[in-house]
Image (cartoon, rainbow, N blue to C red):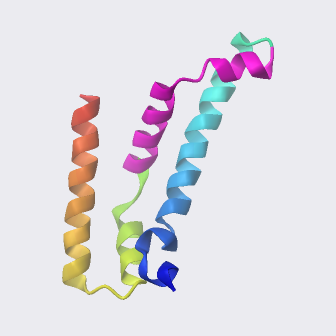
């Protein structure tokens, strides 16, 4: 029942995870030539890398996806607009943190 009321369960988490995995794989592929084996490659990944991948995946989320996910939970347009504003503020904060 709760999955029907939680917009994140309607696609946002899925698309965030896909974006995050894309950044992880791009990084692994870029670092493969510098590593002798998989365990050496894994040791090169840092928490800072994971944070950067998360920020990038979140920034890549389309606000249209967010709107659709909230609408599928039965939220009204005014409620959705408030959530979009909040979403965009969060993206701005991430942008300032990068700064």
The magenta span reads 37-59
Residue at image coords 37%, 47%: 59
28 to 67, vertically: above or below: above
- Placement of 91 over or under 51, stated as above or below: below
Outermost residue, right side: 37
User: Is 58 left, or right, of 82 in this rendering?
Assistant: right
The image quarter in which residue 36 lies: top right
Q: Is residue 32 visible?
A: no
Dominant secondary structure of the residues highlighted in magenta in the image: helix
Number of numbered discs on residues: 0
Horizontally, residue 33 falls left or right of residue 67, namely: right
Q: Position of residue 28 (x, y in %)?
A: 66, 28
- Of all residues, the one furthest to the front in this rendering is 2
Residue 70 at x, y percent in the picture: 37, 77
Whether residue 53 appears in this view of the structure is yes
Quadrant where the C terminus lies? top left
Residue drawn at point x = 25 percent, y = 33 percent: 97
Is residue 57 magenta-colored? yes
Q: Quadrant of residue 33?
A: top right
| Vertical arrangement, residue 82 with respect to residue 44, above or below | below
Measured from the top left, where is residue 78 in percent x and y?
18, 81
Residue drawn 21% across the image and 74% down it:
81
> In the image, residue 45 lies at what x, y percent?
59, 23
Q: Give me the residue at 46% from left, 46% from top.
A: 57
């Amino acid at each position: 029942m709760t999955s029907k009321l939680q917009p994140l369960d309607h696609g946002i988490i899925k698309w965030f995870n896909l974006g995050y995995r894309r950044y992880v794989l791009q990084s692994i592929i870029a670092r493969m030539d510098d590593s002798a084996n998989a365990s050496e490659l894994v040791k090169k990944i840092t928490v800072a890398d994971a944070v950067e991948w998360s920020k990038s995946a979140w920034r890549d989320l389309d606000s249209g996806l967010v709107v659709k996910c909230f609408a599928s939970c039965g939220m009204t347009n005014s409620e959705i607009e408030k959530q979009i504003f909040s979403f965009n503020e969060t993206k701005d904060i991430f942008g300032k943190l990068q700064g």
